[in-house]
Amino acid sequence: MNPFLTQCRASFEAQATLETEVAERGRRQAEWTRFEALGWPTTRLEDWKYTTLSGLEKLSLQNSVEFVEEVKGGLPSLTLKGIPAPRLVFVDGAFQPDQSMIDGLPKGVHLRFWSDLDAPEREQFVRKMAPARALTAFGALNGALFTEGVWITVDAGCALEAPLHLVKVSRTGQRMSHGAVLLELGENSELTLREHCEGSTDQPTHSNWATAIELAPRARLTLVKVQQEGLLSYHTAALHALQRAGSRLQIFSFALSGALGRNDLTLRLIEPHAECVLKGVYRVADRSLQDFHTSIEHDSPHCTSDECFKGVLEGTGKAVFNGRVRVALDAQKTSSRQSNHNLLLSDKAEVNTKPQLEIFADDVKCGHGTTVGQLDEEQWFYLRARGIAADLARTLLIQAFTLEIAEAIPHVGVREEVRRLLSGTVGESDHA
Amino acid sequence: MLSIRNLQASVGDKPILKGINLDVKAGEVHAIMGPNGSGKSTLSNVLAGRENATVTGGSVTYQGKDLLALAVEERAREGIFLAFQYPVEIPGVGNVYLLKAALNAQRKHRGLPELDAMDFLALVKDKMKLMEMNESMLYRAVNEGFSGGEKKRNEILQMVVLEPSLAILDETDSGLDIDALKVVSHGVNSLRSPDRAMILVTHYQRLLDYIKPDFVHVLSDGRIQRSGGPELALELEREGYAWVGDATNEGVVAP
């Protein structure tokens, strides 16, 4: 057993002794057993072929259940300036009521925390989280070790204009955090969720969250996630979404830093006229890897999916994109687009990209495209021929490549904010 | 302003320019005409600094400096402007951003203060009126989704904003209908001044009906074969390039 697993087992056992509820103890035991049965992901497994966890397995990280009093103590050093209300703040996996601002939420938006749920509610919560946790071994680990979760429900017809910010900070080194998010949107309701994954330590950390989403007919959810973690942070995340008739899910995922990131996303379109947009950017440089494994499942006719991921690879950076699209036999009139474009800026960088189309229906429009290339010399020359310095021209073109993804974010405030993140300080207000 | 001496350049292993000599003084407009493959575009590219052509001999002096020793962006900041034959689309970089960055790079180089957003916008909007362009184009990405005519207008817009000392227009008339050609020519003519020079590179005489050159040079097989006044362009229109040994034996009448 590697040091990581040894410590996970210790955490699991510590948690089991604290757990008073028999059913809950049983559910966690089942998840741990499942995690052990799946085995530690190695590159011998097809899903992990290009993503080695050799860095993570050497780490011995504590789960927040082992320092729960400490994380409740408040966080004077943490600055969350610039993240407006409404916001939910988690630090090292523990919810921070003092840092959060949720008073002004409309009546139709309900937040419940795992730690406040009664036994039947916990059973329900775990059942709804199950599809997300089923996606990977880390999902099972999340089920065994998670310490907090938030259950967000939006009532039918309720539209929340201001984005809800979900802030996850890895503050302390040598720690892991396992949290759960359950999002349920009622009929014709609307929400924008802005997820911040940040690190404020140079020490190793592991953030392992699971997110389960259910959209009722005509519900509209936009999820904008940005990972900006430390150089030694490990990030694994599993997301599962279930979409009913006419619902619209838009996910924008930006993996901008960290030692290793692995995002597994499965979106299921299970009733007619559901639409999903899945877009993302990964940026890797020396000693970093980002991996997106996505699966869009067209189970019903007349649904639309639009997927585009863009990667910028520098130094010895590595990236993996695996885009599965499955169109079931009776999912006629499906319209599906997928693309993955990569800028390979160094001889030592590496990208492994794999579109995986499984189409069983015959009356469908499905397209996909993949490119791996360098910066466009013509564009570079053009900018320099207008007097722009060679380095700045290069930076601008790299940013422009990724900005296209941000442009599609519907909420103007979030779009501007992400645009600024992608642009650094260059030309903040002038990009069109 | 510009002095080209025995300039030779190759693209790949193929010699394209085989000894160009040309002097351009402030206030002058020179037209360089020639058949396809004569080296016209290579000459514009070498002057602007594009790396795909390799200079194998000769010299270019611009305002007393060795032009060939300057980087592309330094040439631009020193006042050389190339209007591209095929302006490139740059999704994700705003037109307004490019204009402002270009203008301020030039001003900084000359020791002038950068323009603030208000002054800059006032200037640009004024120039857009001249080019009969819709202001909304400012907020689009550089040339993205622009028609051929819009791209050429956008080139000239950049030129009138940057007010170069030496403007090189590479086949600016190609792909323009007559109305767009008039607007573009109007923009170019507005910049004519005693302290500014222009080089018009063109296959056809048509552009020269709107922008009157002081000198016309005929380029063929990498050399200037003949030089003269505006009347030379008219002669070319009547007689074609056949007499200079154009292998394609192409006429110069616009299609």
Image (cartoon, grey):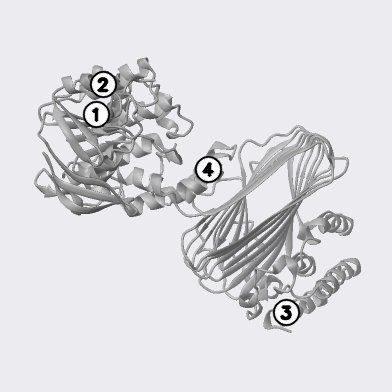
Q: Which mark is residue A404?
A: 4
* Residue A241 point in image, percent of width and height: 77, 49
Q: Are marks 3 and 2 in contact (CB under 8 Å)?
A: no
User: Which chain does the residue under circle 3 lie in?
Assistant: A
Residues at discs 2 and 1 both on one chain: yes
Amino acid of disc 3: Leu
Q: CA distance from mark 4 to mark 2?
A: 51 Å
Between residue A268 and residue B59, name the one nearer to us: B59
N-term-proximal mark, 4 vs 3: 3
* Residue A58 point in image, percent of width and height: 63, 81
Q: Nearer the viewer, mark 4 or mark 3?
A: 4
Label 4: how many residues lie within 10 Å, few (<14), some (14-19) or many (20+)?
Answer: some
Q: Are marks 2 and 1 in contact (CB under 8 Å)?
A: yes
Quadrant assignment, res A48 = bottom right
What residue is shown with label 2? B239
Q: Nearer the viewer, mark 4 or mark 2?
A: 2
Say which element carries label 1: helix
What residue is shown with label 1? B243
Q: Are marks 1 and 3 in contact (CB under 8 Å)?
A: no
